[in-house]
């Protein structure tokens, strides 16, 4: 593997960042590791300017209010049609029954759902941050944790972007315990994993409604968010933890138009009494019982190993080097889950740099790298559409497990990547020179084979597409 200053800078930008853009290689070539570490120490690392974006609860209320107004408009239209039929026998005879679907469609045209625009506004803020950053290490950490603690816009579109801003970005370089508390108590997560319908069987609400427990949130916290699948917990632990988490919900908009969508602990839903999880009895009252369990899960050795392995797989290799996993596990434990120190340990280790850049980028990483290299801006509709075509729609993972981080899950989509590369190349060919990208942006660090393929292309569009599909942009 080449070890020139520029080559090491490119490796840093691809493996730990979001790919080279104009000037970025030269900016860090003298000390790639130092540049990565400096980004972690930046005061605003991982945060984005979002003054114009609503909070998750505000977005939730906007959508709920629009839906309620749309339903009311549809009912009003249906009643008006009924009234016309009552005074117009010919109309009633021609169409004896009113069409509620037609009324609903007309109401939707008058009062569109704001959820889609909220999603696009959040996507634009995220895309702009990815294109503007010098390296993108902190941004990659945001993407990692957002995928680790994923929710889906398919279920709660209004909160999907705000959840990332509120529960992920402020905590990526803090204590894992604080990140865990933030995500599990966020209304988006509670809604996504159905904790809003989980009721303690012996709670006041449970006795009155004869409804019961939902285990989804408890199970995913143990399996995916902390300890890892099939580790130290049992089904009894899942049930006990689910009881602990009863009462963690959000205020309904219908009952509270000013604060609907915000987190609330509803004691009437909470299972009373002590619960035992992983052999420890938790007797804390109310919401503190759940927080105590989360704190212990955050400090568990199995959690440290699970997080370390996922981080190494995400950044370095599909088969994580054991030594690097062990090193990050020790750092996690020795620092009480200090994620800044864990990230520093990752880039400070020789093992993190030793592997050649053969790991296939996920679609989102590749598309971002392509646009950064070309130096263009990105329209959020087109950008998110491209990600969806490639099988990684933004904030829409197929399950609570999130998107996979191995090549086998993405290699079958290379044909779709070629389609996207061709389409993008066609759009920018008149203003982006592939030779400029190779010489000025990538600082001539591409292989002789890639340079030759680009030089032999029959058109600028084809040359750009070939460059975008080259290993230098596909791999890290």
Image: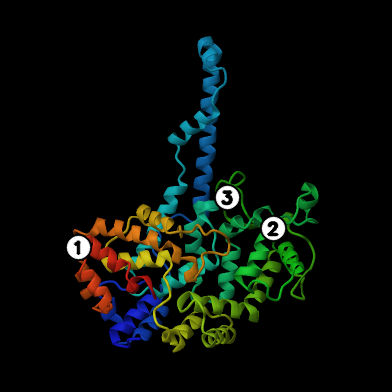
Image location of residue 284, percent across then percent down: 74, 69
Residue of label 3? 260
Secondary-structure class at tag 2: loop
Quadrant for the N terminus, please: bottom left
Please determine whether, in this image, residue 242 is positioned above or below residue 304. above
What label sits on residue 247 in the rendered view? Answer: 2
Residue drawn where x is 75% and y is 57% of the image: 200
Secondary-structure class at tag 3: loop
Image location of residue 392, percent across then percent down: 46, 60
Q: Looking at the image, which residue sits at the far top?
A: 89
Circle 1 crowding by C-alpha within 10 Å: few under 14, some 14–19, many from 20: few
Residue of label 1? 458
Describe residue 113's horizontal placement relative to residue 373 as left or right. right
Image location of residue 279, percent across then percent down: 77, 76
Secondary-structure class at tag 1: loop
Real-space Cα separation, disc 2 to disc 3, in angstroms: 16 Å
């Amino acid at each position: 593997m080449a070890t020139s200053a520029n080559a090491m800078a490119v490796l840093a930008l691809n493996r730990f960042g979001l790919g080279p853009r104009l000037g970025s290689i030269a900016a860090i070539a003298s000390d790639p590791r130092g540049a990565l570490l400096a980004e972690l120490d930046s005061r605003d690392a991982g945060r984005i300017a979002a003054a114009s974006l609503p909070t998750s609860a505000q977005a939730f209320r906007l959508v709920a209010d629009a839906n309620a107004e749309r339903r009311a408009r549809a009912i009003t239209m249906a009643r008006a049609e009924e009234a016309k039929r009552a005074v117009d026998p010919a109309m009633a005879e021609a169409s004896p029954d009113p069409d509620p679907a037609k009324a609903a469609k007309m109401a939707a045209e008058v009062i569109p759902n704001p959820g889609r625009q909220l999603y696009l506004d959040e996507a634009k803020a995220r895309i702009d941050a990815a294109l503007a950053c010098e390296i993108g290490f902190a941004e990659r950490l945001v993407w990692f944790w957002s995928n680790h603690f994923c929710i889906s816009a398919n279920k709660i579109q209004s909160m999907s972007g705000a959840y990332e801003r509120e529960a992920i970005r402020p905590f990526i370089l803090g204590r894992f315990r604080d990140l865990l508390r933030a995500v599990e108590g966020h209304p988006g997560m509670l809604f996504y994993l159905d904790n809003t319908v989980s009721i303690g069987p012996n709670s006041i609400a449970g006795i009155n409604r004869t409804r019961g427990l939902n285990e989804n949130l408890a199970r995913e916290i143990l399996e995916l968010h902390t300890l890892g699948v099939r580790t130290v917990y049992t089904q009894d632990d899942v049930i006990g933890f689910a009881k602990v988490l009863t009462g963690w919900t959000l205020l309904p908009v219908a009952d509270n138009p000013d604060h609907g969508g915000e987190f609330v602990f509803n004691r009437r839903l909470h299972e009373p009494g002590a619960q035992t999880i992983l052999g420890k009895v938790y007797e804390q009252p109310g919401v503190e019982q759940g927080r105590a369990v989360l704190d212990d899960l955050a400090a568990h050795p199995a959690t440290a190993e699970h997080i370390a392995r996922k981080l190494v797989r995400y950044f370095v290799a599909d088969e994580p080097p054991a030594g690097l996993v062990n090193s990050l596990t020790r750092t996690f434990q020795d620092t009480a889950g200090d994620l800044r120190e864990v990230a520093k340990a990752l880039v400070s280790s020789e093992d993190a740099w030793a592997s050649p850049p053969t790991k296939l980028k996920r679609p989102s990483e590749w598309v971002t790298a392509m646009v950064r290299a070309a130096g263009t801006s990105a329209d959020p509709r087109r950008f998110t559409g491209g990600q969806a075509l490639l099988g990684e729609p933004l904030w829409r993972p197929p399950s609570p497990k999130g998107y996979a981080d191995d090549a086998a899950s993405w290699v079958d989509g290379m044909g779709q990547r070629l389609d996207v590369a061709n389409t993008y190349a066609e759009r920018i060919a008149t203003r982006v020179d592939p030779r400029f990208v190779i010489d000025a942006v990538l600082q001539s660090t591409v292989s002789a084979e890639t340079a030759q393929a680009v030089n032999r292309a029959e058109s600028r569009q084809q040359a750009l597409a070939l460059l975008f599909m080259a290993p230098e942009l596909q791999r890290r």
